[in-house]
Image (spheres, rainbow, N blue to C red):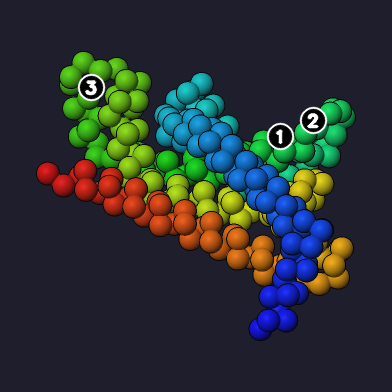
Amino acid sequence: MNSLFIRVYEILVGGNRYKLLLSGLGVTLQVTVFSAFFGVVLGLLLAVMKLGDKSKGILRIPYIISSAYIDVIRGTPSVVQLLIIYHIVFGGIKNVPPVIIAIIAFAINSSAYVAEIFRGGILAVDIGQTEAGISLGLSKVQTMRYVVVPQALKNAFPALANEFIVLMKETAIVGYIALQDLTKAGDFIISRTYNAFIPLFTVALVYFVIIKFLTKLFNMFEGRLRKSDIR
């Protein structure tokens, strides 16, 4: 056991390699948080577009666009989307930081799943809530904004929390675009120390601890939301 601790110290502390993991963790969190934020914004827009009237002329266009977008994004691997955005969309543009490209790619990917989550949350809101908002003099947009969406967010929160956790794990592929996240930092340490066991298990442990913490945090927040439902 002592020899294991000594080996861990040599690999992670020796040469300050633990700083690579800390730096990589910062990149992972940065990509995850910003991608989740923009993914939620875009996903909500897509959900509203898909819930629009799909049977009348020009009003059918938003439905077609959102449906096609969601089908394409959900039907292709996230790593392929990342590489397309990196090599093709931004391939001819110089000096674009890889972290920005990663955020854009994962925001686009996440938005398709978030859109379906929001759509389900909105459909779960009783139609009587919409009728009540309109009867109070609110427009359809105001009713959606002030009455339906807040309730839909509450309904969709558990699925949104799960999407955030899944998104964090999916960001482990950003090494494909030469971005040094937590996983890539572990790979770099392996190449320098020729030891795979300690770096990989350290990376796995860091992911596990963070995701366990986030799960507890989301569960606490969800519990508070549920308490507010009790009259």
- What kind of residue is marked 3? Ile
- What kind of residue is marked 2? Val
Q: CA distance from mark 1 to mark 3?
A: 42 Å
Q: Which residue is more in the foreground, 38 or 119? A: 38
Which residue is painted at 81% across and 72% down in the image? 195
Circle on res. 134: 3
Where, by quadrant of the figure, is residue 216 drawn? bottom left
- Circle 1 — which element? helix
Which residue is painted at 59% across and 37% down in the image? 34
Left or right, 41 with respect to 151, comes to right
Quadrant including the N terminus = bottom right
Circle on res. 96: 2
Figure check: 196 above or below 88: below
Residue 73 in view in this figure: no
Q: Residues within 10 Å of mark 2 (few under 14, many from 20)?
A: few
Figure check: 198 above or below 210: below
Q: CA distance from mark 2 to mark 3?
A: 47 Å
Question: Where in the figure is residue 209, as x and y percent of width and height?
Answer: 53, 61
Left or right, 186 with respect to 133, comes to right
Question: Where in the figure is residue 103, as x and y percent of width and height?
Answer: 66, 38
- What kind of residue is marked 1? Ile
Residue at mark 1: 100
Mark 2 or mark 3: whose residue is earlier in sequence = 2
Q: Which residue is more in the foreground, 181 or 42? A: 181
Can you tell which of label 2 and label 3 is closer to the viewer?
2
- Circle 2 — which element? loop
Question: Where in the figure is residue 55, as x and y percent of width and height?
Answer: 44, 30
Which residue is painted at 35% across and 25% down in the image? 145
